[in-house]
Amino acid sequence: MEVKGCEWAARVVALAGAGRAADDVLRETLRNARELSAEDRRTISRAVFSYYRWFGWLDAQRPVRARIQHALELAEAFAERPKTFSNEKLVTRCLPSWIHEHADVTAAWVRALQAEPRLWLRARRGQGRTLAQRLGHCWIPGAPALSDALEYRGEEDLFRTPEFHAGEFEIQDVGSQAVSLACDPQPGETWWDACAGEGGKTLHLSDLMANRGLIWAGDRAEWRLRQLKRRAGRAKCFNYRTVIWDGGPQLPTRTRFDGVLVDAPCSGVGTWQRNPHARWTTTPQDVRELAGVQQQLLERVAAAVKPGGRLVYAVCTLTRAETVEVAEAFAGRFPEFAPLTLGNPFQADRSGSQLWFLPQDTGGSGMFVAGWKRALPRR
């Protein structure tokens, strides 16, 4: 790696080490460095993420630039000769020690985490193959339910393409796309995306509903909802409204919904391929605290599900405390909610009321999804 790229990557690592997330620092650094070419930006990004992906293999006594160079060498060797890396070393060196007590750590999962992440696009409903032909360098998964999910393997800046500006696709991880597909919203229904963030799943739900019906998009941060509105305008999504909700006991509406999606805040363990810095900053205390937040969110939104309606819980983490234990606790406290069979977009024969989308199986982030249906009143 050339000296300039190493120097820029070292700056990012130094700032991230001061308590800021590496991806945020990287984004800000590249945004302010207008003199860098597109190739420079790709090189610097790859160096920063390789550093954290192989952090457990690096000698802390060496200068940071030397460590970055070593990380890049390890990344290249793993890409070309993955079998020369033993499962034992990968499992012990690539993850923090605490995760072994909180999640099922397998060699297959860790190998997936050490690979370069894929770039996934979501085309408008029914337009996957057409978009793939127009953009080129695209691969479509074989599962019929994912025919509008595209892995982009080219090097063009997609944000500059006319297809992006025309709202023909969103950049969205395939695991995130699978959550909306599992919800199976129907045209004309009313849904609440309770933790909408910047609206990736809101826009997907809208597309699946053919822009008919209504989606409430809630979040505690107004700036995220403003970003959603910008994205919705580009995507020509009109069947939504935004609402501030901080997760408190006072719900933002008295509406009763056909479906509620709680894409809850979580430890993000499922994103450790794309966000390797988080491996070394997330703690068991984070997991415990977030599990409590998730349980509280589910309990509070339950009242907003109409009889016969569906409640879907999703998190991009794989810890037991934030997945099956949250689902079991909710089921125990709300017997009027029966398990709901969710379709598995990746494998139709593996549907169920609880789904795991694992990086080694899907090529995307790790996700857990659970669903319930509220009982109809007795006659």
Image: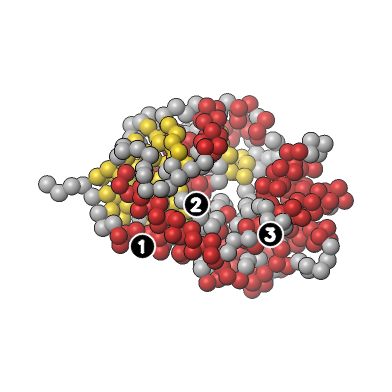
User: Compared to 228, does 162 lie above or below?
Assistant: above
Mark found first going from the N terminus, 3 or 1: 3
Identity, as a three-letter code, of the amino acid under mark 1: Glu
Q: Which one is closest to the eye, mark 2 or mark 1?
A: 2
Asked if residue 107 shows in the view, the reply is yes
Q: Which mark is residue 53?
A: 3
Pick the residue in front: 221 or 39.
221
Q: Which one is closest to the eye, mark 2 or mark 3?
A: 2
Identity, as a three-letter code, of the amino acid under mark 3: Arg
Q: Which mark is residue 328?
A: 1
Residue drawn at 65 percent across, 33 percent down:
159
User: Compared to 357, does 103 lie above or below?
Assistant: below
Badge 1 local density, few (<14 within 10 Å), some, or many (20+)? Answer: few
Mark found first going from the N terminus, 2 or 1: 2
Query: Residue 308 in the image: x percent, y percent?
Result: 25, 45
What separation in Å lies between label 2 and label 1 (alpha carbons)?
A: 18 Å
Query: Residue 77 in the image: x percent, y percent?
Result: 75, 61
Q: Which mark is residue 25?
A: none
Query: Residue 202 in the image: x percent, y percent?
Result: 46, 38
| Residue at mark 2 | 265
What separation in Å lies between label 3 and label 1 (alpha carbons)?
A: 33 Å
Residue drawn at 62 percent across, 48 percent down:
118
Question: In what element is the residue under mark 1?
Answer: helix
Residue drawn at 21 percent across, 47 percent down:
376
Marks 2,1: beta carbons within 8 A:
no
Question: In what element is the residue under mark 2?
Answer: loop
User: Compared to 130, does 83 lie above or below?
Assistant: below
The residue at the far bottom in this view is 88
Q: Quadrant of residue 165?
A: top right
Badge 2 local density, few (<14 within 10 Å), some, or many (20+)? Answer: some
Residue drawn at 67 percent across, 53 percent down:
20
Pick the residue in front: 252 or 311.
252
